[in-house]
Image: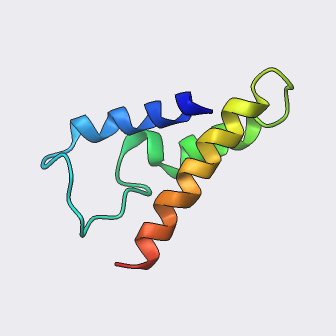
Amino acid sequence: MLLAFSIDLDHLLASPIFDPSRCSINFHPLHSYYAIMVYLVLLIPGKTRLFAIGLLSHIIADSADCLLI
């Protein structure tokens, strides 16, 4: 589940790397709606389910930040 934080590596592609007024969802490549669909598909096989749960929980946490902006 800790590997789910690896999707934050795409923040390194943004300038500035961290902007508290920016919503990560659909801004960074690994936080895009297409990537989220892939994470949902990863829930189906048993071998990738834990990783998918970690990725989706990360996305949920990031989307909660978007609600506060």
Q: Which residue appears at 54% of the width and 49% of the height?
A: 58
Toward which corner of the image does residue 45 lie, by quadrant?
Answer: top right
Return the residue nearer the eye: 11 or 5: 5
How many marks overall?
A: 0
Q: Residue furthest bottom?
A: 68
- Place of residue 49 in the rendered image (x, y in percent of width and height, measured from the top left): 78, 32
- Place of residue 23 in the rendered image (x, y in percent of width and height, measured from the top left): 35, 64
Toward which corner of the image does residue 43 lie, by quadrant?
Answer: top right
Q: How is the image coloured?
A: rainbow
Q: Residue furthest top?
A: 47
Q: Residue furthest left?
A: 16
Q: Which residue appears at 42% of the width and 55% of the height?
A: 26
Q: In the image, is 35 to the left or to the right of 14? A: right
Q: In which quadrant of the rendered image does the C terminus lie?
A: bottom left
Q: Which residue appears at 63% of the width and 47% of the height?
A: 56
Q: In the image, is 27 to the left or to the right of 48? A: left
- Place of residue 61 in the rendered image (x, y in percent of width and height, measured from the top left): 52, 59
Q: In the image, is 47 to the left or to the right of 20? A: right
Q: Which residue appears at 60% of the width and 41% of the height?
A: 55
Q: Would you place residue 65 above or below residue 43 in this image?
A: below
- Place of residue 1 in the rendered image (x, y in percent of width and height, measured from the top left): 63, 33
Q: Would you place residue 6 above or below residue 20 in this image?
A: above
